[in-house]
Image (cartoon, rainbow, N blue to C red):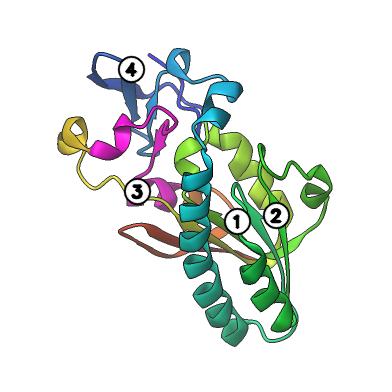
Amino acid sequence: MRRCPLCLNHQTFLLLQDKKRSFYACRLCGLTFADANSHLPPAAEKQRYGRARIASKQRQLSQFILPLLEQLQYQQPGQLLGLNFGRIVDAECLRVVNAAGHQLNQYDPFLAPDHEALKLQYDFICCYRVFEHFQYPSKEWNLFAHLLRPGGWLAISTPLLIDLDGFAKWHYKNNLTHVSFYQKQTFEYLAKNSNFALLFAAKDLVLMQKTS
């Protein structure tokens, strides 16, 4: 069996094989993942971005980050340093964040590969529709654990896989850049086995906090 790319164990089984890819599920952490042999090369994945798709995601990302930042201010008053990981927001969103007295750094492997941003520690990290693109999510998970300060917040937007039996009909798996799919159980596993507390996980929003 394939090794789970998140918890790195071999307690996996073949869940589905369609015309394009094979998908495996992990019994331990609940991750469902595409066979690594079907991963797109970086150049092909970058090509799928497209300008229209980038603009659409920027609007959605702003609608995700700005309300979240307002809520975090109640929990942690003062200036906040955040990292927007995996996508980029537009200039207007950054202006609103800066006007509120906060700073938002950005890292996107294709559009903003600023590795200096990965050398700091943050009060919060936002990941909007990027967790499903992680080919080896254990790497990103370890990175986030390092980048967040104690008490820091990790906000994730990714559609949760609700029913394994319905995976074959789930449209979200049909995008070839989507290679990792998470259940609520997956984030419960991560919280139990790391210095994180799972605060909320439903539909497409997961909120976790690094414990001090």
Front residue (pair 198, 116): 116
Q: Is residue 99 above or below residue 140?
A: below
According to the image, label 4 marks what residue? 21
Quick one: label 3 or label 1, which is nearer the N terminus? 3
Query: Viewed as shown, does residue 104 lie left or right of 65?
Result: right
Q: Is residue 19 magenta?
A: no
Which residue is located at x 47 percent, y 69 percent?
Answer: 63
Q: Which of marks 4 and 1 is in front?
A: 4
Describe the element under mark 1 as helix, strand or loop.
Answer: loop
Image position, residue 32 (x, y; %): 35, 32
**Mark 3 is on which residue type?**
Gln
Image position, residue 54 (x, y; %): 52, 48
Contact? badges 3 and 4 (CB < 8 Å): no
Q: Which quadrant holds the N terminus?
A: top left
Quick one: label 4 or label 2, which is nearer the N terminus? 4
According to the image, label 1 marks what residue? 195
Front residue (pair 44, 168): 44
Local crowd at mark 2 within 10 Å, few (<14), some, or many (≥20)?
A: many
Local crowd at mark 4 within 10 Å, few (<14), some, or many (≥20)?
A: some
Query: Looking at the rendering, which quadrant does residue 122 occupy?
Result: bottom right
Quick one: label 2 or label 3, which is nearer the N terminus? 2
Residue 185 numbered mark, or none = 3
Describe the element under mark 4 as helix, strand or loop.
Answer: loop
Q: What stretch is highlighted in magenta?
A: 171-189
Quick one: label 4 or label 1, which is nearer the N terminus? 4
In space, the residues marked 4 and 2 are separated at their CA atoms by 32 Å
